[in-house]
Amino acid sequence: MSVLCEICDLSVTYFGDVDVKVIEGLNMTIEEGEILGLAGESGCGKSTLAMALTRLLENGEISGGRILFQGQDLVRASEEELRKIRWSRISLVTQSAMSSLNPVLTIGEQIVDAIQAHTNTKTREAWKRAEELLSIVEVDPGRVHSFPHELSGGMRQRVMIAMALALQPDLIVMDEPTTALDVVVQKQVIRKIKELQAKFGFSVLFITHDMSLLLSIADRIAIMYAGRLVEIGTCQEIRTAPRHPYTRGLLNSFPSVFERRELTGIGGSPPSMLAPPNGCRFHERCTLVTERCRTEVPRVTNLSATHAAHCHLLEEGVTSG
Ligand SMILES: Nc1ncnc2c1ncn2[C@@H]1O[C@H](COP(=O)(O)OP(=O)(O)OP(=O)(O)O)[C@@H](O)[C@H]1O
Ligand SMILES: [Mg+2]
């Protein structure tokens, strides 16, 4: 596998009465043709990372680091360069299709607009392509003249995926793309995403707080806590050998992951990003906390070629399983 996108020491800061750094020193790669899952509790910075990757941050900025996408640093790219990259090389699907779609245009018009904004495709061809894209995501191409409000939630989400696919990007960032859907439709949409990814070979950064969903779709999984990466590994490594106490807690919060275990979850709640704890940010909630955890930021420990975690217990070679 080769690297499609390398995120190096990334920090993101939002502006306010006081500026708040909500992502700090994040290192992560997205490989070509993989589905990389990203999980963590609400507020840990998942959507912020999605917006940083597409350079669509509102009220905030990338305050440090690099995002090397196919060798080009997106952090230093001009607006002009970014316009060329968005949609055609990186596209974004968010949770709320209703607010991303324009209510006064038919879905066909919107897909055609997206195609023509980036390519020299003739109108007739673009409409043909719009119908083709709808059938790819299993929406009846006859729906091309429907308005967003005439479609069900699941269909709208498929239309968003069709639009994301329109220019055959190399990376699709999906931020909770199925959260607003009921479970049955959610499963259908996920299956479709997985199928399309296998067929077209693009990479996906799939963001959700639902670990059981990630375990069913991702090739690798990254776990964030309070703005930092805490663990990353293959789906198998994260499922069968999670090493960070936070990852274990997350897995324990979902019944379908460890069915025969008692559900313990994680006590307490994530810290305020205005004043995050010193040392390991998880230490206040960690049952295995030591003195060092309160003061020293844990470095990365490589557990295999694909598996790494940031925890003092691992640095010291202590396993807690
Ligand atoms: N536009 C903004 N201005 C200021 N602070 C923001 C802004 N957007 C997000 N934040 C803050 O940044 C932190 C990370 O938020 P983010 O939305 O990235 O989390 P998330 O992991 O996506 O959460 P969720 O699971 O709820 O979607 C939170 O503390 C949030 O309050
Ligand atoms: Mg979010």
Image: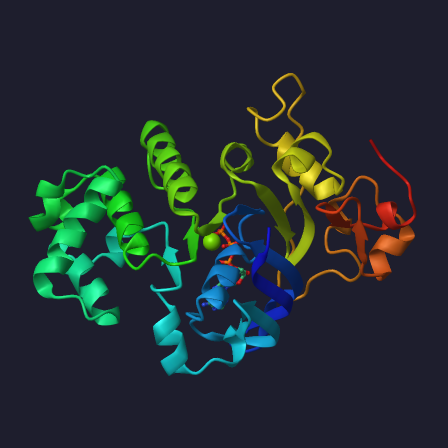
Residue lying furthest top: 260
User: Residue 98: horizontal and vertical position, in percent?
Assistant: 24, 51
User: Residue 129: horizontal and vertical position, in percent?
Assistant: 18, 53
Q: Is residue 129 above or below residue 213?
A: below
Q: Is 151 positioned to the left or the right of 55 in the image? A: left
Q: Quadrant of residue 81?
A: bottom left
| Identity of the residue drawn at 86% across and 45% down | 313
User: Residue 201: horizontal and vertical position, in percent?
Assistant: 43, 48
Q: Quadrant of residue 304?
A: top right
Q: Residue 42 or 210: which is nearer the viewer?
A: 210
Q: Is residue 97 above or below residue 251?
A: below
Q: Quadrant of residue 296?
A: bottom right
| Identity of the residue drawn at 85% across and 35% down | 320
| Identity of the residue drawn at 38% across and 47% down | 200
User: Residue 80: horizontal and vertical position, in percent?
Assistant: 36, 82
Q: Is residue 221 above or below residue 165?
A: above
Counting every numbered tag in the picture gives 0
